[in-house]
Image (spheres, rainbow, N blue to C red):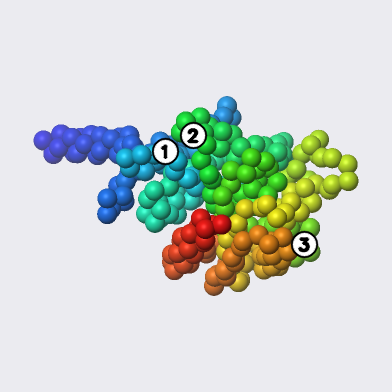
Amino acid sequence: MKKDINIILICLSLLFLWTSCKEKKIKLGKGVSFDKEENIHYGKNSDQIMDLYIPNTKSGKGKEVFIIIHGGGWRAGDKTQLTFFTLSMMQRFPDYIFVNMNYRLASETQYGLPNQINDIKDVSAFLEKKLKYSPKFILLGNSAGAHLSMLYAYKFDTDKKVKAVINIVGPTDLSDSGFKNYQEYSFVESRLVDPRIMKTGVSRIDFASPVKWINKNSPPTLSYYGNSDRVIPSTQGKILDSVLNKYHVLYESYPFNGGHLDWDKHPHDEFLINKIETFLKKTDKK
């Protein structure tokens, strides 16, 4: 009898887990809820998947989209690293659509660029087709994801659909002597950019440096850097701010007390979300 009860309890537990995984709605309290679709394929490669969260409101037309891009040195990481932060953002921004995306990782047999930039472009195109309108995008990334967010926004967003960039501990100038101390710098030099896409007169390092592509039409940028980050030196944020200021691009930059992986720990995460909310209000007035 006891054995039968245990079997029944196990079956009920499995049923609960199965129905939870199948749940297509997330409730975040105070009337905030989103429809969710996980692991949507936006391309043919197995790495080209994303999670999509659409707010439950009367009208989804015209809503802006946060595209969340994970870090991991361009050759590691996964969107699940930013799931909890994405949910925290959704609580603060209940009227925005959210995408948490994976992208094709660099390796010894596959270059990071242009694949990773093309993946952001493909996500944008996929969303336009699915939503049936052309939304404005806010690119938010950490570390390598922040680098890709800036590079895409400054160089490849030819249609100017990126409204703002949220740069969290991202490398901005790969030629900076401070960044050359990065322990994986040899990989950056050899495997980040496919040499076949290069034009004469531009080095692969300069091509992959977001600051090299900033101009007066670049989107507003908010940056967040740790004052004891041993991966991304503080010079990266200073160089970025200097170039944005030179071209009169709206920007804000904030430090936090911690290292490269501490930005989403309390209270740093709450501080960042507060600053994002204020910053986007400023971009609305532009």
Quarter of the view holding residue 47: top right
Give how far apart the Cα atoms at labels 3 and 2 are.
40 Å
Which label's residue is closer to the chain start, 2 or 1?
1
Label 2 Cα crowd, 10 Å radius (few <14 / some 14-19 / many 20+): few
Name of the residue lying farthest toward the left: 1
- For image coordinates 71% across by 41% down, the residue present is 113
- For image coordinates 64% across by 40% down, the residue present is 159
Name of the residue lying farthest toward the right: 201
Name of the residue lying farthest toward the front: 285
Q: Under tag 1, what secondary structure?
A: loop
- For image coordinates 76% across by 54% down, the residue present is 212
Name the spot of residue 23 as percent of width and height, x first: 31, 37
Q: Find disc 3 in the rendering and name its residue.
A: 176
Which amino acid type is marked by label 3? Asp
Label 1 Cα crowd, 10 Å radius (few <14 / some 14-19 / many 20+): few
Q: Could you tell me if the residues under marks 3 and 1 are in contact, i.e. CB atoms within 8 Å?
A: no
- For image coordinates 48% across by 45% down, the residue present is 64
Give how far apart the Cα atoms at labels 3 and 1 are.
43 Å
Assign the N terminus to one quadrant of the image.
top left
Q: Could you tell me if the residues under marks 2 and 1 are in contact, i.e. CB atoms within 8 Å?
A: yes
Q: Under tag 3, what secondary structure?
A: loop
Compared across the picture, whether 133 is left or right of 167 comes to left
* Residue 133 circle label: 2
Q: Of circles 3 and 2, which is in front?
A: 2
Q: Find disc 1 in the rendering and name its residue.
A: 61
Q: Under tag 2, what secondary structure?
A: loop
Which amino acid type is marked by label 1? Lys
Name of the residue lying farthest toward the top: 44
